[in-house]
Amino acid sequence: MATVILPMLWIVFDVVICLRAASISTPMSSIEVALWGAVGLALGIVALVSSWSEMKRAHSEEVKYERDRGELRTEIAKGSSFNEGAFWSIGRRLEEFSKSPLPHIQEKVAAVRTELAEIPALKPHIVYDGYDEVSVKHGDGSLFKYAHLFFRNEPTGSSMLDAAARTEFLEYVYGAPLFLVDAKWQEVPHDLGRGTRAANKIDLLPNKSSHPLDLVVRAPGSADCYALQVESPSNLNDERYRLAQGLYRARVTISCQGFTETFLFQVLNDGKNVQVLELEQVGEAINAKAELKR
C-alpha cells in the first residue's frame, strides 16, 4: 500500500509547490519555508522507512523460501523415499509460496513445480522377506509340513490395497510352465468354503510387516509335495499340482489395481524338506540370492 501512496504524495507535494511559486510573486516567509521543508522532510523519512520495511519483508520471504526450498530439494533428492504425507506437505508449502507477490519467488515456485513433475509416481515397494517350513498337526494327529513365502511393503512405498497373488511353477532348466495357481495368503481363513477365493485379498501397508503366502504342503512320509492354492483345504493332494522330488522355478506375481510385482524363486524338494532361494536376473544370467529361511 505504501509503495502506491508515497509516490502520489510526492506528486501532490511537487504540484502544490509549483502552484505556490507561480501564483504568488512575493517571496516565501521563513515560517512558510520551514513548513514546506518539514513536509518534504517528513515525506522523505516516511519513504525511507517504507523502503527499509519493504526490503526487510522481501529479505524475510527470500530467507524463508530458500530454507523451505532446501527442504523440498532434500525430499526430491530422496526420490523413491517419498511417503504420502511428504507429497501433502510439499503441496501445502508450494501453495503458501504461490501467494507471494514477489516475481522472483513466483519464478522459483514454478521451477520447483517442474522438478516435482519429473518425479515418478509413488508405487508400492514390495520385497521378499524369506520363507519358512512348519509342521502343522491335523485333526487325525498327523503332521503336515507347510512352506510359506513372506513379503513386506517397505516404508518407502505406497499402500497396496486388495493385493492378490498367483504362483506359476516351471521346469528349472528350460523354464517350461507346469501349472499356475491362485495362491492363498495364510492370514485369510481356510474354512470359508467357496468364499475363500473372494476373501483372498489383503492390504500390504508400508510398515515392514511381513505377510506369509502359502507355497507347498507335504503329507507325512511323502517325498512329493503339492502346491497350495485357494481350494487346497478341500484337496491337499491334488495331482494337478504335484511336485515330485527335484528342482523347480516358481514365479510369484503380486498385484492390485494399477500395480504388479513379480518375483522368481528356485524351489528344491529334496524329498524331506523344501529349500527356497530368490533368483535375480542380471543381463542374461540368473543368479540365486542368499537363502532367507526363518
Image (cartoon, helix red, strand yellow):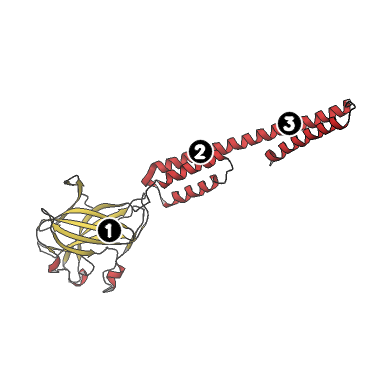
Residue 251 visible? The answer is yes
Sequence-first tag of 1 and 3: 3
Q: Quadrant of residue 16?
A: top right
The amino acid at mark 2 is Arg
Q: Nearer the viewer, residue 8 or 54?
A: 8
Label pair 2/3, CB-CB below 8 angstroms = no
Q: CA distance from mark 2 to mark 3?
A: 33 Å
Sequence-first tag of 2 and 1: 2
Residue at x 88%, y 30% (from the top left corner): 24
The amino acid at mark 1 is Ile
Foreground label between 2 and 3: 3
Residue designated by label 3: 45
Residue 289 visible? The answer is no
Residue 106 higher or lower than 200, as above or below: above
Residue at x 62%, y 34% (from the top left corner): 55
Residue designated by label 1: 254
Q: Label 2: how many residues lie within 10 Å, few (<14), some (14-19) or many (20+)?
A: few
Q: Which mark is residue 67?
A: 2
Which structural element holds mark 1?
strand
Residue at x 17%, y 65% (from the top left corner): 143
Q: Nearer the viewer, residue 181 or 152?
A: 181
Q: Tell me residue 177's x, y (percent).
A: 14, 60
Which structural element holds mark 3?
helix
Q: CA distance from mark 2 to mark 1?
A: 41 Å
Q: Nearer the viewer, residue 234 or 180?
A: 180
Q: CA distance from mark 1 to mark 3?
A: 72 Å
